[in-house]
Image (tube, rainbow, N blue to C red):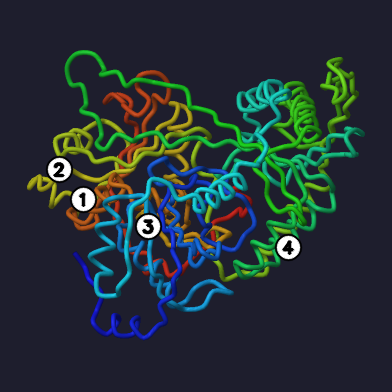
Amino acid sequence: MTTLNRSTLRRLKKLKQSSAVWEGDRRALPAKIRQPQDSSNIIPLHGHDEESKPHCILWVDGSMGMVRSMDVVESAVGQEAFVRALLQAIEHPQSPAQPSLPQKILVCDRELQFYLRGVLQDLGISVEYVERLPLIDEIFSHILESFTANPPVVPERFAAALHKQSEQLWQNAPWNILWDHQVISIKLDHWDLDTLYAIVMGKMGLEQGVIFYRSEESLVKFRQRIVAGNSEDEIEETFLHQDCLFNLFETPELEMEDDFPPFPFRGKVRALPTATTPMKPIYGALHPLEGGRPYLYDEEAIALTVALEALNSFWEQYRKRLNSNFGKLSGTYTVYAPNLDSDVEEAIKVIVKTMPDLADELHQLVEEEDDDDDDSPLINEDLWPDNALIHMMTIPWEQVEFLRNADIHHQFSDAITAIAPAKKGEGLPGLMIQTSRPKALELIEEINSFDGIQSLCFNPAEDIFGNACQLGLMVMGNDDLHLFGEFDKSTLNGEHHKRWKQRAKNTKGNICVIIAMGITGASRGNPAPHHILGYYEIKIIDDKELGLGKLRAEPAFDFEF
């Protein structure tokens, strides 16, 4: 058992010992009480796992009825943290308490009692066990009450209707077509709301959903401040100045196959179980004076439900025209909204319009920013087909040999020609891009127009709040850069990503890119030999070779609280 240093004991013995009786305990707290990583007043939307609930250590003076020290630690932290909190209570207590030694300590844990007796044996402090600690029980009950006062995410009475419209929005998936500068107005004239201004998020690969700004001014000012902002503090403050309701979606990451499935040279294609992508809606509001709220009050829930239903109706009426041109379109819809004061629904006429002029204004803001930075390399994001599956895998050397001899589009590397016969390691790391046959053939033609693929790089970047991530960049033969993925910290630290990069080191940076068809059904993620249409042997390079430095992931409108 770890004991106190002699110098520490001498220092503590110089303090006055009072006749006070202290209580000490350590208890689990709900995960949402965890201290945030920054000073933001935004409430975290994504809860931590049960096992990661924080623990609170509390030392109180039972004689005076005051807290001397309190600390929040991870659940895995040992009993040493309990002693650290005790030393703080002794030497640096919370005001107005003064430094002193207690005469007696009460705990309700036998193991903790024996531990403290050993640590404090030279200080003349009695450590006793009791079944209950009334003062600490009372303090913890107040702590828990203060964090369970939040209302439900959506008031129960309106939850079913809101979720129905949210699910319809997910099925419509307007982010496959609309960009985040294309504004759609929704005139309500109810619930103290005149017009909401809808922005569809997700076209650029970030979190999908719709943000409904309560005013045009709030939307425009937010975009202007994002363009003008430089530091992380400025951008976070800008984020908090939005005035909006939102319905975003969280899609849990599906486990990726670690290796490329074996090619079925004989027999039928091995089936890969398929499942629809799970949908988890996130509702909430932002306001400059309230910060972020991951829940809605009654009127907000009704307004968001009506806005979603009108937007869904508008989308279903004009989808084909929106796909070809974001011109002037308008629709009027009768929506039956719940009534706050009765069970009788109220018929509301909602007018929905596109705002192409405002869309051009917002788009111009970004273009002006790009024009001011002529030296910055342009990173393209429009090469890959919509809904393409991009997957990192390892291809066994036997399958590499098969691909090199197959009658498909090839780009060979002398380096792989040299190392392939040795068949060292588990195989050749690769990046598979799987889509439909027409889109795969079109992609191969586009790559040919770029003089093939030169290399691949993971470049350091950060999101708008300064969180570290990496951008997956593909360098084409004409030096154009194309983004193929954004990798957050959890992905970078995952075993699959680490193994893939280690295998790339084993092959001295030689990897490949595969373009395949068969995006639907059993062949999704598991293409048969005849599904492979393109095979490119390339190098993975260090980000220093590109010389881009740390980049900022754009666009900066990902609502990840």
In the picture, residue 10 is in which quadrant? bottom left
Picture coordinates of residue 387, whole percent (x, y): 50, 32
Question: Which residue does the image show at 39% across and 37% down from the upper left?
Answer: 433
Residues tagged 2 and 1 counted as in contact (Cβ below 8 A): yes
Picture coordinates of residue 113, whole percent (x, y): 29, 56
Residues tagged 2 and 3 counted as in contact (Cβ below 8 A): no
Query: Which amino acid type corresponds to the residue marked 4 in the rendered image?
Result: Arg
The residue tagged 4 is: 225
393 sits left or right of 245 in the view:
left
Question: Which residue does the image show at 85% across and 26% down from the upper left?
Answer: 340
Q: Estimate the spatial distance between the alpha carbons at disc 2 and disc 1, rounded to whole Å.
A: 8 Å
- Residue 526 lies, with reference to residue 509, above or below; the image says above
The residue tagged 2 is: 426
> Which is in the foreground here, disc 4 or disc 2?
4
Q: Estimate the spatial distance between the alpha carbons at disc 1 and disc 3, rounded to whole Å.
A: 15 Å
Query: Which amino acid type corresponds to the residue marked 3 in the rendered image?
Result: Cys
**Residue 254 can be seen in this image:** yes
Q: In the image shown, does 125 or 374 lie closer to the viewer? A: 125
Q: In the image shown, does 410 or 436 lie closer to the viewer? A: 436
Q: Estimate the spatial distance between the alpha carbons at disc 4 and disc 3, rounded to whole Å.
A: 31 Å
Q: In the image shown, does 252 or 459 lie closer to the viewer? A: 252
Q: In the image shown, does 399 or 488 lie closer to the viewer? A: 488
The residue tagged 1 is: 503
The secondary element bearing badge 2 is classed as: loop
The residue tagged 3 is: 457
Picture coordinates of residue 429, whole percent (x, y): 25, 45
- Residue 379 lies, with reference to residue 339, above or below; the image says below
Quarter of the N terminus within the rendering: bottom left
Residue 132 circle label: none
Name the N-terminal-most of marks 2 and 3. Answer: 2
Name the N-terminal-most of marks 2 and 1. Answer: 2
